[in-house]
Image: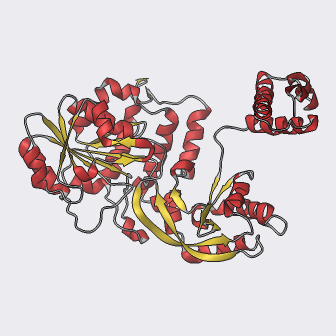
Amino acid sequence: MSSLRELPSVHAVLRGLGIEAPSPADTHAVRATLSRLRSAVRSGEPAPGHEGVIEMARSDLDRARQAPVRRVVNATGVILQTNLGRAPLPTAAIAAMADAARGYSNIEYDLAAGGRGSRHDHLRPLLQQVTGAADGLVVNNNAAAVLMVLQVFAAGREAIVSRSEAVEIGGGFRIPDVMRESGVRLVEVGTTNRTYADDYERAIGRDTAMLLRVHASNFRVVGFTATPALEELAAAARRHNVLLVDDIGSGCLVDTTAFGMAHEPTVQESLAAGVDLVLFSGDKLLGGPQAGIIVGRADLVATLRQHPLARALRVDKLTLAALAATLQSYAAGTATTDIPVWRMASASLEGIHRRARRWARAVPGAEVVRGTTMVGGGSLPGEGVPTWCVGVRTAGEPGSVADRLRCHEPPVIARVADGRLLLDPRTVDPGEDSVVIEALAACLGADGG
């Protein structure tokens, strides 16, 4: 039976790695390797030889030296892949972030007046222009926007929500839980599949602060259903002097039907229907950085801006710079060509097919197959656009092949479906095609499949 004494010391491993003057990080990585090996030996596994320990420590050290957040290539066929960071940023947004990060900025300095300014002033004109709202405010994500609006305008009172919209989205974010944390009492109306404007109106009482509509961003209820129009809810809210708040989630500012998709509610439509405040994300269909955006009535946004939570939930200079550049593309009318989300959605099938054929040539036996690119990110549930994928069937488990691609540098993330590996060019920037081809050749080429 292997003995713990067979394992070398930390100093011996460091010498074996050729590290004469180890940093604290080097020592920590080697200790972690030896700790893992001790646990394995105690459980009955054989101790590796000295050289085996050195190689394990070298691999661990290499991983420890890598940046924890790394670039990956998204070949999954999901445009807004939440696990991979949702929307890739436009070139202009990346340049704006680099410029803001390089030195100092006027984030809270009024260049015209020569005195203190407000970070909230930078995005207000752009939000007004692209949404048509009277005013707007940006916080660090849409969950924060929901929490803030509930706490500021409904704490200790009631908010009325359709039973079909008391939902849970990714990460365990549940509307009832957020309401409870905000000190708001949830009043559910209607049924799971059918809710009418009268249901809301009958539930309004002295303690009602708002009607809250929550867009069902990651699921659909189909069949025998009914949902009141926003205009009906706005009229009911006005009659009873309560707020109407619309959490639309995706932050869509363009007509999705132009891309062959189902209609996704837009910010402009909500405001035109008479909603008081509209809440949405910056990193979904808007195509910018993570942010929560609140637009609507000027008096309500001013109240939010002056609230202590505005400082607790504010965004930094890098987010402001990236979001401003993204919104400028909408203001200029160039969003569908500037913003990667919309470039991916609108890429021609012919071009996708051509790229897939080039990829497939790197792998013996690979074929080009039809597929669907999903939008993802809690936007347009179940909706996608046609695409062409590279499909690879292997002798072993396709998951193990996906693992090899995932361990490539940079990692290439594919998906497994119907017993084969699938890679979708639509969600890969054309400038990364060579990376995918190299990874396929290395992991699945003549000797790798």
| Residue 403 higher or lower than 50, as above or below | below
In the rendered image, is residue 170 in sight?
yes
Rendering coords of residue 312 (x, y %): 40, 26
Rendering coords of residue 82 (x, y %): 51, 50
The N terminus lies in which quarter of the figure? top right
Q: Which is more toward the observer, 104 or 342? A: 342
Q: Count up the numbered dots.
A: 0
In the rendered image, is residue 292 in sight?
no
| Residue 278 higher or lower than 219, as above or below | above
| Residue 17 higher or lower than 22, as above or below | below
The C terminus lies in which quarter of the figure? bottom right
Where residue 310 sits, quadrant-wise, is: top left
Q: Which is more toward the observer, 191 or 372? A: 191
Q: Which is more toward the observer, 400 or 6? A: 6
Where residue 285 sits, quadrant-wise, is: bottom left
| Residue 333 higher or lower than 30, as above or below | below
Which residue: 34% across, 38% down?
A: 145
Which residue: 45% across, 43% down?
A: 171
